[in-house]
Amino acid sequence: MAKAATKKAPATKKAPAEKKTPKAAKANATGGNKKFDDLRAKTDDQLLDQLTELKREQFNLRFQAATNQLERPARIKEVRRDIARIKTLQGERSRAAEAK
């Protein structure tokens, strides 16, 4: 059996590849995580109020998901991560207070 002749596409010039930087260096170069920086500016009472509000929203989203009335399923993930950010910040602050 004879092999079928295949044509190659003409070679094109490629732009030089950008130098890749680690994620940590990139985050520091751009100013870090904006959401986390916004949370750092808040007081402990404001964080506690926001945490309570987010937990209430998470509770309502679970009910909406169970009854198939959820408009934005991705909102569950966003709320869960926001709660984690606040808890992380609260933990950092409590450890810093203990160290003093």
Image (cartoon, rainbow, N blue to C red):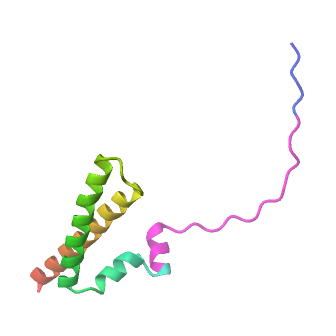
Depth order, front residue of 23/34: 34
Q: Position of residue 65 (x, y in %)?
A: 32, 50
Identify the image quadrant of residue 89. bottom left
Q: Please tell me which residue is depicted at 38% across the width and 76% down the height of the picture.
A: 35
Point out the residue furthest to the top here.
Answer: 1
Q: Please tell me which residue is depicted at 30% across the width and 61% down the height of the picture.
A: 80
Confirm whether the magenta stretch covers residue 78: no
Q: Position of residue 29 (x, y in %)?
A: 49, 80
Q: Which residues are magenta?
A: 7-29
Identify the image quadrant of residue 4. top right
Identify the image quadrant of residue 57. bottom left
Q: Position of residue 98 (x, y in %)?
A: 9, 80
Q: Please tell me which residue is depicted at 76% across the width and 64% down the height of the picture.
A: 15
Q: Is residue 87 left or right of residue 13?
A: left
Depth order, front residue of 31/2: 31
Q: Please tell me which residue is depicted at 30% across the width and 57% down the height of the picture.
A: 61
